[in-house]
Image: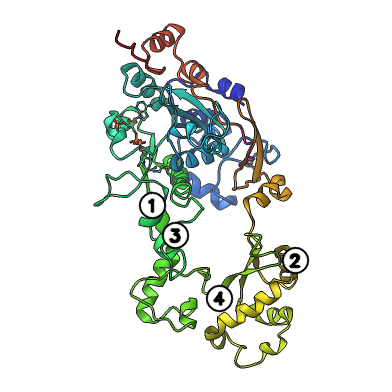
């Protein structure tokens, strides 16, 4: 793939990649009407054809006409998890992602939670697939020279430095926008504008500040953070959508824009149902929360709801055969009203279908503990997978609690490319999570993460077009290599 990339980049020195692609396609048949105003043209065409009009549908088979973001080049100034999640997704959709790293050190995660001596950690490899790496000291004048060239030749700059760090490098919005008016500058920060905007933020800080922790856990226990990285990876996902939208808008406006995702906002967006419940509280207790059935009064803020379902249907995690010795022999069971009849039949309580004490959701609310105890007597007679089969046969949705071991070994996830085995020159084979978004015309091939500075030379020459003498000058300046350790005083 790197080879292919190099070919397409040989003449990209002064023009952003997608601009180049657009110019190229303008030479093709569409050129005839290129002088007409875009909107007029689009309206006229869409009246005749389905979809948005031009271009004509490709004649190539699906999956063989490039990728969704082919031609887009990303200056990836991200580190740790939130930013790299975003740029990895863009790379999987075909963008050429150039990761800029500090010489000698790189993304701090390369050396965090190391398991194989001398190899980049899984933390790094699993967040940086399909990217190229160049090392640049962004504060060195020759480093800035390279960065400026990258800004001119990329479509998007993505960063998640601490607040103000990009400005301190001299890369303000005004500076970048003057250098390349088409550049989209996308940032993850912990908080949006306001009292906390200058704070550094990590995953769990965002989970707490975004309303997730106060609503997670059991009522009588402390707030809990979740294992899913909703602050980091969740915000990276939000940012990717913002970038793609900005790229789409740029087709019309011709100019870039700033895209900002604050981790607090991203978490709150994912905890939206809890803000819903906060407002419902004004109008009475939250009847689907088990504390209502237990007669425990509500306070003035949404309480932690244990394993109650957020969708308003009573749900619990119940033991299956093997629990509690097997810590994951459990299943999530929802007593959804439309399947109450089949549930009663399955658990051997057919009279509950018509008994007025059980027949309606309202009648069941004060008895949920007793009802779930009865259901658990039934689930404990089977493994979680047997419960799942029995329930799905009659359209009752249930969720087996899958361990990471079970997920890693699940063959169907391997077949869909959701769990992928990747080979790495230093660490050997490892498992990663592939692209969870499947597209029929933009197929993801997961490629290993780059070694630190692995692509420095090819980016300087093939992408940026520096001549050999210029490359030598930049390299000799020390802008791309780790500072030499100072000699100890004699
Ligand atoms: N060359 C020279 N300097 C570089 C560099 C490069 N290639 N890359 C980074 N640096 C410098 C920065 O300019 C900054 O210097 P400054 O503080 O003197 O201006 C310094 O490295 C540290 O960067 P910073 O982002 O502050 O890292 P940190 O380790 O102190 O903080 C975070 C890490 C994640 C807390 C912080 O970056 C942050 O809050 N980011 C936004 C929110 C976020 O994404 N959090 C989740 C991460 S998963």
Please report whichever mark, 2 or 4, sits nearer to the chain's N-terminal start: 4
Image-quadrant location for residue 61: top right
* Circles 4 and 3: CB atoms closer than 8 Å: no
The Cα–Cα distance between marks 4 and 1, rounded to whole angstroms, is 28 Å
380 w.r.t. 108: above or below: below
Q: Spatial distance from mark 2 to mark 4, Cα to Cα?
A: 22 Å
Gap in angstroms between the C-alphas marked 2 and 1? 38 Å
**Secondary structure state at the residue bearing disc 1:** helix
Looking at the image, residue 135 lies above or below residue 404: above
Q: Which mark is residue 386?
A: 2
Q: Tell me the CA gap for discs 4 and 3.
A: 21 Å
Task: Give neighbour class at mark 3: few <14, some 14-19, many 20+ (Cα, 10 Å).
Answer: some
Instruction: Classify the position of ligand 1 by quadrant: top left, top right, bottom left or bottom right.
Output: top left
Q: Residue at x 41, y 80 (%)?
A: 285
106, 117: nearer the viewer:
117
Q: Quadrant of the C terminus?
A: top left
Q: According to the image, label 1 marks what residue?
A: 206
Crowding near pointer 4: few (<14 within 10 Å), some, many (20+)? many
- Quick one: label 1, few (<14), some, or many (20+) residues within 10 Å? many
First of labels 3, 1 by sequence position: 1
Q: Mark 4 or mark 3: which is in front?
A: 3
Q: Is residue 471 left or right of residue 353?
A: left
Q: Which residue is mark 3?
A: 224
Q: Position of residue 75 (x, y in %)?
A: 43, 31
Above or below residue 472? Residue 113 is below
- Name the residue carrying label 4: 314
The answer to whether the residues at label 2 and label 4 have Cβ atoms under 8 Å apart is no
Indicate the position of residue 85 as horizontal and vertical percent values.
Answer: 49, 42
In the rendered image of this protein, does residue 256 appear above or below residue 102?
A: below
- Magenta-colored span: 442-447
Pick whichever of labels 2 and 3 is earlier in the sequence: 3
């Amino acid at each position: 793939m790197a080879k292919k990339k190099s070919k397409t980049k040989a003449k990209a020195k002064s023009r952003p990649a997608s601009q180049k692609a657009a110019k190229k396609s303008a030479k093709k048949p569409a050129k005839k009407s290129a002088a007409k105003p875009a909107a007029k043209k689009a309206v006229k065409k869409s009246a005749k054809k389905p979809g948005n009009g031009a271009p004509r549908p490709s004649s190539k088979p699906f999956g063989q006409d490039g990728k969704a973001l082919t031609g887009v080049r990303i200056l990836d100034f991200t580190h740790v998890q939130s930013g790299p999640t975003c740029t990895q997704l863009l790379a999987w959709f075909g963008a050429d992602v150039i990761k800029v790293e500090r010489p000698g050190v790189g993304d701090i995660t390369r050396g965090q939670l190391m398991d194989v001596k001398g190899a980049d950690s899984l933390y790094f490899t699993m967040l940086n697939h399909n990217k190229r790496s160049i090392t640049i000291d962004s504060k060195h004048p020759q480093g800035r020279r390279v960065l400026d060239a990258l800004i001119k030749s990329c479509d998007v700059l993505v960063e998640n430095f601490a607040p103000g760090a990009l400005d301190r490098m001299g890369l303000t919005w005004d500076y970048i926008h003057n250098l390349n008016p088409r550049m989209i500058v996308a940032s993850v920060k912990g908080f949006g504008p306001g009292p906390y905007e200058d704070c550094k933020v990590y995953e769990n800080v965002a989970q707490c500040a975004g309303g997730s922790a106060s609503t997670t856990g059991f009522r009588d226990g402390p707030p809990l953070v979740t294992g899913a990285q909703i602050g980091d990876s969740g915000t990276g996902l939000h940012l990717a959508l913002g970038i793609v939208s900005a790229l789409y808008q740029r087709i019309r406006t011709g100019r870039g824009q700033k895209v900002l995702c604050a981790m607090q906002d991203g978490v709150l967006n994912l905890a939206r149902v809890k803000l819903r419940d906060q407002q419902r509280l004004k109008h009475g207790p939250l009847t689907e929360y088990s504390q209502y059935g237990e007669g425990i009064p509500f306070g003035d803020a949404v309480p932690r709801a244990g394993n109650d379902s957020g969708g308003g249907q009573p749900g619990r995690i119940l033991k299956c055969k093997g629990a509690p010795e097997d810590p994951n022999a459990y299943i999530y069971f929802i007593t959804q009203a439309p399947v109450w009849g089949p549930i009663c039949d399955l658990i051997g309580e057919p009279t509950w279908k018509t008994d007025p004490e059980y027949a309606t959701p309202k009648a069941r609310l004060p008895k949920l503990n007793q009802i779930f105890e009865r259901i658990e007597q039934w689930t404990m007679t089977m493994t979680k997978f047997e419960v799942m089969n029995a329930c799905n046969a009659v359209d009752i949705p249930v969720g087996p609690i899958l361990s990471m071991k079970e997920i890693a070994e699940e063959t169907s996830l391997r077949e869909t490319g959701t769990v992928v085995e990747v080979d790495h020159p230093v660490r050997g084979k490892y498992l990663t999570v592939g692209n969870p978004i499947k597209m029929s015309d933009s197929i993801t091939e997961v490629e290993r993460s780059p070694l630190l500075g692995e692509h420095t030379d090819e980016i300087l020459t093939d992408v940026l077009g520096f001549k050999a003498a210029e490359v030598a000058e930049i390299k000799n300046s020390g802008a791309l290599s780790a500072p030499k350790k100072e000699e100890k005083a004699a």
